Image (cartoon, rainbow, N blue to C red):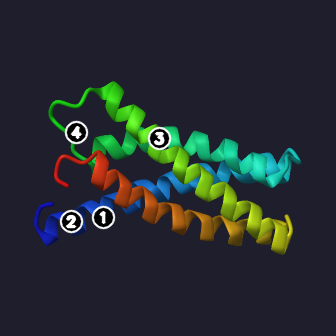
Amino acid sequence: MGNAKTLIEQVLKFGIVGFAAFVVDYGVLMLLSQFLGMNAVLASGISFVVSCTFNYLASMHYVFRHREGMSKRREFTIFVALSVVGLAINELVMWAGTAMAGESALAITVTKVIATAVVMVWNFLSRKRWLDADR
């Protein structure tokens, strides 16, 4: 797993990439839900997929080290599978949050922040376990 300093650096890089992915995710979500009038849960699913693509490219380049002997195809497949679980978590939190608080911009924002925090923990732990060479 490496030393504590290396792990802290990795968590910080993960946070930076995650923040950028959140900006992409949130921007697409608000564009679709607030400007185009799309249902917030559907818009959240679309924005999550766009953000996930960005996140894969950035995470596997800047955060995690490629495992020797693992093909890029397998790496991407595992990343997508882990992201699908993250998407399910995201959608469940978005559904529950908007069902309780409504679909105003504030309610969607608060719900999205909560969903992002929960999914972020899942993403780091699962990617560290199944994708990182330094696990």
The mark closer to the camera, 3 or 2, is 3
Residue drawn at x 35%, y 25% as measured from the top left: 73
Q: Please tell me how crowded label 1 is: few (under 14), some (14-19), or many (20+) other residues with Cα within 10 Å.
A: some
Please tell me the numbered disc located at residue 66: 4
Residue drawn at x 32%, y 42% as measured from the top left: 60
Residue ID for mark 2:
7
Name the residue type under label 1: Val
Please tell me the numbered disc located at residue 11: 1
Residue 51 horizontal/vertical position (percent)? 55, 45
Q: Please tell me how crowded label 4 is: few (under 14), some (14-19), or many (20+) other residues with Cα within 10 Å.
A: some
Q: Earlier in the sequence, mark 3 or mark 2?
A: 2
Secondary structure under the numbered disc 4 in the rendered image: loop
Q: Please tell me how crowded label 2 is: few (under 14), some (14-19), or many (20+) other residues with Cα within 10 Å.
A: some
> Label 3 vs label 1: CA separation?
21 Å
Tag 2 and tag 1, C-beta contact below 8 Å: yes
Q: What is the quadrant of the C terminus in the image?
A: bottom left
Tag 4 and tag 1, C-beta contact below 8 Å: no
Name the residue type under label 4: His
> Label 2 vs label 1: CA separation?
6 Å
Q: Earlier in the sequence, mark 4 or mark 1?
A: 1
Secondary structure under the numbered disc 3 in the rendered image: helix
Secondary structure under the numbered disc 1 in the rendered image: helix
Residue 15 horizontal/vertical position (percent)? 39, 62
Is 16 or 50 nearer to us in this picture? 50
Residue ID for mark 3:
81
Q: Earlier in the sequence, mark 4 or mark 3?
A: 4
Find residue 125 and report its image quarter.
Answer: bottom left
Please tell me the numbered disc located at residue 35: none
Is 27 or 110 nearer to us in this picture? 110
